[in-house]
Image (tube, helix red, strand yellow):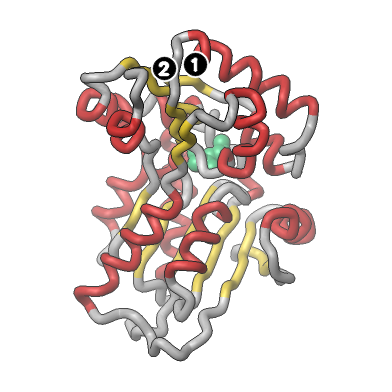
Amino acid sequence: MKPTSPIGIFDSGIGGLSVLAHLRRELPNEDLVYVADSGFAPYGQRSADQIRARSETIASFLQAHEAKTIVVACNTATAVAATALRRAMDIPVIGVEPGLKPAANRTRSGVIGILATHGTLNSEKYSHLVNRYGREVEVISQICNGLADLVEQGLTDSDEARGLLAQYLEPIRQRGADTIALGCTHYPFLIPEIKRITGEATDIIDTGSAVARETRRRLEPNCLHPDPGREGRTHFFASGSVEEAAKRIALYWPEPVRVRPLP
Ligand code: DGL
């Protein structure tokens, strides 16, 4: 492994681009290899075994690409597969979790809302998180079926998205939550619509930037950063139709992309 080896990132589809954007800013000299597992999206309602199997396949692909670290840019995959991946791999595996801790620290009303998939909110990992950081606050955990799909289709600014968000945010608003943590990497793309419903004063927590800082920290002890003058490149792979994946990625990524098929 060399300092110029890439960082591997994956998600069920394009949600992880919300994390990739923070990684690109935080680590401008690094090569990033992003895998959208679009052929198997969404993960949210798949079984834990299916998600673990997909995560292992993608992690092996990234390791074969000499990845020096892997960022699981998916809360659902982190919840059910990160422990197994860490056991199986000899490189750091960094996951994303709903920001329950920062939400519990920041709330003034003492009520926080967590938006995530069925897979994340029903995982053992999430129960531990609630037991650990949710003791002093009221936690409203809301499964958001269908939202990630709408983001995949580019329908963030649509009546369907507004309708689902209004429904999912209602119990959270009713209880007086002033802080909402986004427990799915697709949801940061919905922040403008969420704020339109909750009002600007609601604190929305997206853990993407914390994940990027953590990735930088994890590379430092091993001196695995490339030269500061180097310009990092971003590569994209996808399962399923690469043409479709390229169209979807283009909706949320500011540069032209070429997407290669995941073998
Ligand atoms: N982006 C994923 C997450 O963070 C999941 C979306 C899905 O595939 O259901 O949980």
Q: Tell me if the residue at label 2 has its CB under 8 Å from ligand 1.
A: no
Q: Is residue 61 visible?
A: no
Comparing 216 with 31, the one in front is 216
Q: Residue at x 35, y 84 (%)?
A: 3
Comparing 92 with 228, the one in front is 228
Q: Residue at x 63, y 59 (%)?
A: 238
* Residue 160 image position (x, y, % from top left): 76, 25
Q: Residue at x 65, y 48 (%)?
A: 39
44 up-or-down from 253: above or below: above
What type is the residue that disc 2 sits on? Ile
Is 132 on the left or on the right of 44, as rendered?
A: left
* Residue 115 image position (x, y, % from top left): 49, 28
Q: Is residue 208 visible?
A: yes
Q: Secondary structure under badge 1?
A: helix
Residue that label 2 marks: 140
Q: Earlier in the sequence, mark 2 or mark 1?
A: 2
Which label sits on residue 243?
Answer: none
* Residue 118 image position (x, y, % from top left): 49, 25
Residue that label 1 marks: 172
How far apart, in angstroms, are the residues tagged by discs 2 and 1?
6 Å
Is 72 on the left or on the right of 244, as rendered?
A: left
139 up-or-down from 71: above or below: above
Is 255 on the left or on the right of 106, as rendered?
A: right
Quadrant where the C terminus is found in the figure? bottom right
Q: Secondary structure under badge 2?
A: strand
98 up-or-down from 107: above or below: below
* Residue 212 image position (x, y, % from top left): 40, 60
Comparing 165 with 10, the one in front is 165
What type is the residue that disc 1 sits on? Ile
Mark 2 vs 1: CB contact within 8 A: yes
- Image quadrant where residue 124 sits: top left
